[in-house]
Image (cartoon, rainbow, N blue to C red):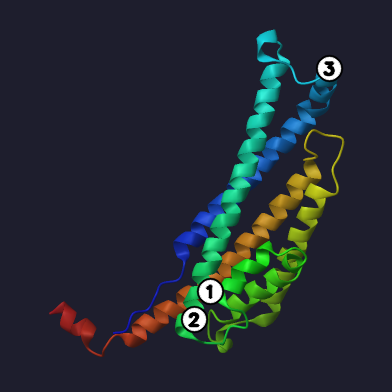
Amino acid sequence: MRYAPSAPVRPAMWTCVLLVSNVLAVTALAIFEATRGQTLMREIAAMGGMPRESEGNPVVGAVTVFALLVLLATGIALTTAGSYLGWLWRARQTIEVYGLTRPRFSRGWAIAVWFVPLVNLVLPPLIVHDVWRGSSSPRRLTLAPWLTLLTCWWASCLVTVWTLVFSRGPLLTGTGHAQAASVLVSALLCGATIWEITRAQQMTTDSTVRLDVPAGAGRRGLR
């Protein structure tokens, strides 16, 4: 029986857990901004800058909480991005083994495009589609629902980037309800694309393993 690599189920699960954690961290930051952000900005401005801990001012505690929330949200976001690219690498590796379709992009390029300015606004969904296309036999794949999901996911990602970078309110970091909502939607759709690809690859790997088992092996194993 030839070796058949398994679908990247664990990387997919870990990435989805991190997506949920990212949503919770951004939501916590947005709640802090909504309940304390503007007041904290006025208090800091009235004191002529960031307060020193030696002053014993209660503002120090609020600033500390704010800093921890920012660090937490940033750390989880970076970890989530790394986990997603790790899952994508594994998924891309799997389709090379089964060769159901010929990939349009090399494995290295499939990761590199995420770091190239402007290119990373267009090519990433094509990379993900390429992986999905090679994850199962064409007769098992349903194109229209997948393209709808893929388009909605990438559109939500672009909207999230826009709201986080260009559409900031009068807050400490600009993270408000709109930003938290866009992060939630993009995370849900991202998780859906991950599981759609992982499920297709799991079906392919399972069927390949069953086909590679010699006839009668199961009966011999029971004796």
Location of residue 134 (image quadrant): bottom right
**Mark earlier in primary sequence (3, 1):** 3
Query: Which amino acid, mark 3?
Result: Gly
Q: Quadrant of the C terminus?
A: bottom left
Structural crowding at the residue carrying mark 2, measured as other residues with C-alpha within 10 Å and reported as few (<14), some (14–19) or many (≥20): some
Q: Would you say 2 lies left or right of 82 here?
A: left
Disc 2 from disc 1: Cα separation: 7 Å
Disc 3 from disc 2: Cα separation: 60 Å
Disc 3 from disc 1: Cα separation: 53 Å
Q: Which residue is mark 2?
A: 96
Q: Which residue is mark 3?
A: 48
Q: Circle 1 sits in a helix, a strand or a loop, which is it?
A: helix
Seen at 64% across and 43% down, the residue is 74
Q: Would you say 56 lies left or right of 167 here?
A: left
Pick whichever, 49 or 67, lies toward us. Answer: 49
Q: Circle 2 sits in a helix, a strand or a loop, which is it?
A: helix
**Residue 151, x across and y down, in percent:** 74, 70
Seen at 48% across and 60% down, the residue is 11
Q: Which residue is mark 1?
A: 92
Does any portion of residue 56 appear in the rendered image? no
**Residue 172, x across and y down, in percent:** 79, 33
**Labelled pair 2, 1 in contact (Cβ < 8 Å):** yes
Picture layout, residue 159 above or below residue 36: below
Q: Circle 3 sits in a helix, a strand or a loop, which is it?
A: loop
**Residue 221, x across and y down, in percent:** 17, 79
Q: Residue furthest left?
A: 223
**Residue 108, x across and y down, in percent:** 57, 72
Query: Which amino acid, mark 2?
Result: Glu
Pick whichever, 175 or 197, lies toward us. Answer: 175
**Labelled pair 3, 1 in contact (Cβ < 8 Å):** no
